[in-house]
Amino acid sequence: RKEVEQDPGPFNVPEGATVAFNCTYSNSASQSFFWYRQDCRKEPKLLMSVYSSGNEDGRFTAQLNRASQYISLLIRDSKLSDSATYLCVVTVANDYKLSFGAGTTVTVRA
Amino acid sequence: GAVVSQHPSWVICKSGTSVKIECRSLDFQATTMFWYRQFPKQSLMLMATSNEGSKATYEQGVEKDKFLINHASLTLSTLTVTSAHPEDSSFYICSATDRNNEKLFFGSGTQLSVL
């Protein structure tokens, strides 16, 4: 079983729509969780950390469910510029050895 | 601006040649650098962890004699793909942390194509 699994998508949504997807992780000792955004053949960029209580950053909402071992990302009012691959990232300890999911591709159409 | 500089961005080489990729931290001292590889539509896979002044720690399945890592200074780590073959074609990316492990920065990646 992979350490981090994501639905690859693609999720094709119209502008203004809401899109949400999950990521599951296998290691119950995982401590830190992140969502990164990666554009084609570019480096990943941190979108947001995921906190136990859930957190929001503008149109983006992240949630963590430790009992079921998954995190989620919701994007409201999608913009064309949100089209990207979203990587779920998990780390067991704060040593920055990150475990990456394969990514969920989101395409926002006009 | 970028705090981790990685180059080259693109490399096309013949099979059997060696390719060196550099990763530099620009305004901080990177005691630890990580090298990842990403095949199309797959996740970034950690290849090795390098600490300044010591030997790199390779992940299982990564050949240390094929992927030579040197972290000779606090601002520079290099990955050399020796005797590259077409199956080594991939996106290679480095990341670095500062002394306090407070932040993680990624390089811009290197797309290697071996003909």
Image (cartoon, rainbow, N blue to C red):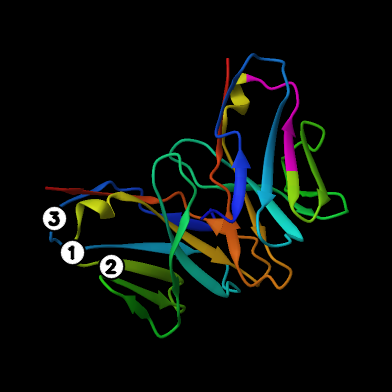
Mark 1 closeness class: few <14, some 14–19, many ≥20 residues within 10 Å: some
Instruction: Give the vertical position of A97 relative to B72 (above or below).
Output: below
- The residue type indicated by label 2 comes to Leu
Q: Is mark 2 on a helix, strand or loop?
A: strand
Q: Do labels 3 and 1 share a chain?
A: yes
Mark 2–mark 1 distance (CA, rounded to whole Å): 7 Å
- What count of labels does the image hold? 3
Judged left or right of residue A81, residue A2 is right
Given the image, what chain letter belongs to the residue carrying mark 3? Answer: A
How far across and down, in percent of the image, does residue A21 sit?
Answer: 31, 61
Residue occupying image coordinates x 76% and y 36% = B63
Which residue corresponds to mark 2? Answer: A74
Q: Which mark is residue A15?
A: 3
Q: Residue A18 carries which label?
A: 1
Residue A43 visible in the current orientation: yes
Q: What residue lies at 74% left-to-right and 33% top-to-bottom? A: B80
Q: What stretch is highlighted in magenta?
A: B78-85
